[in-house]
Image: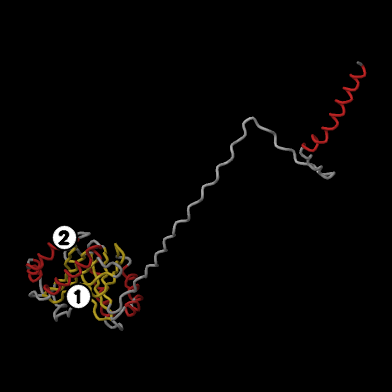
Amino acid sequence: MRAISLALLIGIATLAMATRPAQAQAQPPAPATEPPNQTSPSPPPATANPAPAPAPAATAPPPAATAPSPAPVATAAAPSGPRYVVTYFDVAPPAARKAAGLLRRFAAATRKEDGNTEIVALHELNRPGRFAIVEAWRDKAAYDAHGAAMKALGDALQPLILSPFDARQFARLSVGTTKPGADAAGVIYVLTHVDVFPAGKDEVAAMVKTLTEQGGGDPGVLRFDAVVWDGHPNHFHLIEAWADRKSFEAHAAAEHTKAFRAKLVPFEGALYDERLYEAVKKTE
């Protein structure tokens, strides 16, 4: 009995030794040992709730097409040809006589300057401190050369001045020939500012031209011109001369004048500014 038990134990041991190599081959190979003196990075600590993997980034849309830069706006060159200049200023009423004397001498000297084609010094009716100077020049260069004389006049008037010179340069719109007698006593000058909204400037320009053509044929008219302010194509200036006050009033009541005023109203950006003047008298 003992012999049988011993034989059985030996058989079990032999069977166990026979199966160990197969089990060893089934085990995965152990990771390679790192070289000495190199520290293997420690694995990150495990977390109870690992963060979800980030979603793949959305593909950015293609950049929008860049609008082309606007072409630079060309600066309009100053119109060539004759220059028309109207200068306004005010002095203290008691100094009006002295100012008129300075203006007469200034006008006489200006007529001798190269390129001057017209100059008239005006005094507003019923407003003793208001003066205006109407000039015409061959071109802008001739007017620019006149700058020193204009400055000298301003310096001479400085002690009398209430408001500084307001000089505006104009280009021709509709200019005719001044008739003889414009410098005679009793002649009425009319200076009118016509300001309209920019959108209507072309229509109004055509209306103003028509007015000058019709008004230029009225009895007693000596000149009827229209000019447009440099850089402000929606601002027109009328320069008129009439033999007397009665002639001007007849023109104001004429059907073509009333029709012009009625058509102009929807375009006006400012009130119709019409003012009456007379030439500076030699006795002033």
Residue 186 visible to an observer of this rendering: no
Position of residue 209 measured from the top left corner of the image (x, y, whole percent): 17, 72
- Relative to 42, residue 275 above or below: below
**What's the distance in space between the residues labelled 1 and 2, CA to CA?**
21 Å
Viewport quadrant of the N terminus: top right
As helix, strand or loop, the secondary structure at mark 2 comes to helix
* Labels 1 and 2: the sequence-earlier one: 1
**Residue 123 percent across, percent down from the top left:** 20, 69
Q: Quadrant of the C terminus?
A: bottom left
Residues 208 and 161: in front is 208
Q: Which residue is pictured at 26% across the width and 80% down the height?
A: 108
At x 27%, y 69%, the residue is 229
Q: Which mark is residue 266?
A: none
Q: Is residue 36 above or below residue 183?
A: above
Q: Residue 89: image x %, image y %?
A: 27, 66
Q: Residue at x 26, y 71 (%)?
A: 86
**Can you name the residue that lies furthest to the top here?**
1
Residue that carries the numbered disc 1 in the rendered image: 174
* Between 260 and 238, the one nearer to me in the picture: 260
